[in-house]
Amino acid sequence: DLAHKQQAINQLLYKSTEPIRSKFAELKEISKSWKPLDHKHHCTDGGHALERLVKEVEDGNMLEKKHWFSLFNTRQREEAIMLIEVLLSCTDFEYFRNHAAYFREHMNEGEFVYALYVAVTHSETTTGVILPPLYEVTPHMFTNSEAIQRAYTAKMTHTPAKLQMEFTGSKKNPEQRVAYFGEDIGMNSHHVHWHMDFPFWWEGYRIDRKGELFFWAHHQLTARFDAERLSNYLPVVDELYWSRPIEEGFAPHTTYRYGGEFPSRPDNKAFEDVEGIVKVHEMLDTESRIRDAIHHGYVTSKDGKAIYIDNDRGIDILGDIIESSMYSPNIPYYGALHNYAHILLGRQADPKGKFNMPPGVMEHFETATRDPSFFRLHKYMDNIFKEHKDKLPPYKTNDLLYSNIEIKDVSIDGELVTYFEDFEFNLINALDDTEQIDDVPVSTSVHRMNHKPFDYHIIYNAKYDAVATVRIFLCPKHDYNHIELKMDEYRWGCLEMDKFWVDAHSGENHIVRHAHESSVTIPDRIPFEDLIKQADEAVANDSEFPRRDWRACGHPARLLLPKGKSKGMEFVLFVAITSGDDAALSKPTSSEHGSAHGYCGVRGEIYPDKRPMGYPLDRRIPDDRLYHVPNIHLSTVKVYHKKH
Ligand code: CUO
């Protein structure tokens, strides 16, 4: 049952850089005596994946233990995928667990943790299992070297410690003003989980609108980062140019568990080819092929056919091509723009491999957003996507008007106020230990942004009973120079706040929607320790482990609002109510679709909204008056930042 499954996953991840603890006697025993191949007939693929992985292990071909792991390293990724395929071929949890226990002891730790996370995310046998927060399973990737070093001291001197973590860098670096966003552990956790829900290498069951979600989730990260910059008196991010130096340097102050420090990059570093992997001119070639396709309105598939993209499907195809997922219709021609860009940026400290430096922060989804070049890179790709969207005809009244609905009023109950608070998480998993020395509690405390609770009140009239779709966006109203923006200028910077379905009744309707219900966010994750306690208690008492369909993918609810300013910062609150025919899943009003579907879709289902992601702000708006329809409402709200 679920409690046992949860307990097994907890134990498999606990101190995953050490051999399985002897206190987990059953698991330990399995890991020693398990003969995987004896069980190959239990695999859906007839044991094919299992045989291959066992052979690689026995032949000694696998990456050694206590070595860094990067998903962008082709061989390392293949090894992790082999384990994922083994785990996903188990229809019975017992084999899933036993194989995992065996390979945990025979594979690189980083590969193992990644594979287990992805397998739990996608396997039907683990539905309902809650993944512990990655910042507590692999804390090195989420905290800085200073905190880790002090944690070791605490352990060596056997003194429990609670360490305060500061953001990277100094006030001399203006970028540090927004480090609270790029280094937020919840945002980084969302980002790494997004890439586990939608792996670029994925060839399993068909994932709906995967390419479009790549565009939308990252477009929103970019827009949200820009809103934080404007809140902090910084201009929005400029894109990256392959032919110009990378303006912002970055010193990550972050250490690998094994493999040394993450490399730094000085300011104004000119791009160099990465020996044996990717050349700068290849990026330019790839880019111009993609831009040509956009200008011509079609991409060419591998077998030479034209696939037309000046339609709603186009963005999905371009997303696949630019990310370079296996869904790309022509990888040999359109290349791997996004993935190579991450590698290229990650390697600029040691492009020739002369110093044997480990991969940079850009080569891990856990750490990438710490580097300001992440947002430049994604702005660059976002602009390519925009070029495509801007080619599509603007929406007409027909596409916008829903004559059943007239919005009378939209207001916010409560003030829109952000503030900083401290948040503590556990570093126990970061420390080496032996079973002979007891652990001391070691945790770190980080500053993180949060906001006061608030509700939207939406009053509208309906002519007849129908299901309706409510879409809420928040858009910066002014640019960096405080010039008021037209709709067409601000629409691309709008933050998706929420989307949900309601039963509209003929007559006046009043919606009260709480900010924490947002379909783009998730609440705080359950701490690993609590998860262990809950599962252990449920197993010991033979009681039920509550089934909670919590996602790990989803923007942190705390970061729903941008920071704003102490005297208040104006935003446009955009509310559109359209026909519920937009809903792609049945019973849209009775289900929240497992929450966080806005940026993360629904596990194993199609995307719940039939409209293009970002509708109705994703296309050019030549005239603001087009949006003056009764079912769209614009108002100005202010976001205040206060000292707590
Ligand atoms: Cu998420 Cu570049 O895709 O980091």
Image: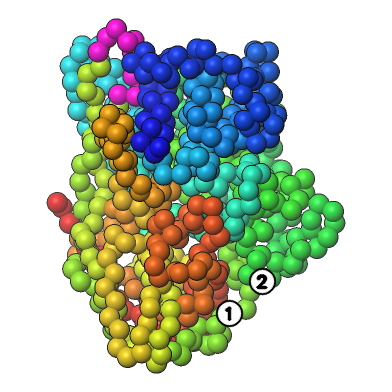
| Secondary structure of the residue carrying numbered label 2 | loop
Q: Tell me, yes or no, if residue 525 can be seen here.
A: yes
Number of numbered markers: 2
Label 1 or label 2, whichever lies nearer to me, is 2
Query: As drawn, is 79 to the left or to the right of 192?
Result: right
Which residue is at the far front?
Answer: 542
Q: Residue at x 65, y 36 (%)?
A: 44
Which amino acid type corresponds to the residue marked 2 in the rendered image?
Asn
- The residue that disc 2 covers is 311
Q: Is residue 400 above or below residue 117?
A: below
Secondary structure state at the residue bearing disc 1? loop
Whether residue 432 appears in magenta in the rendering, the answer is yes
Work out which quarter of the rendered image holds the N terminus and state it: top left
x, y (%) of residue 509?
A: 30, 84
Callout 1, which amino acid?
A: Pro
Q: Residue 195, how many percent across, how many down?
A: 52, 44
Viewer-closest of 440 and 234? 440
Dot 2 crowding, Cα within 10 Å, few <14, some 14–19, many 20+: some
| Coordinates of residue 358 in the picture (x, y in percent) | 53, 24
The residue range painted magenta reads 428-438
Identified at 41% across, 29% down, the residue is 8
The residue singled out by tag 1 in the image is 394
At x 42%, y 31%, the residue is 9
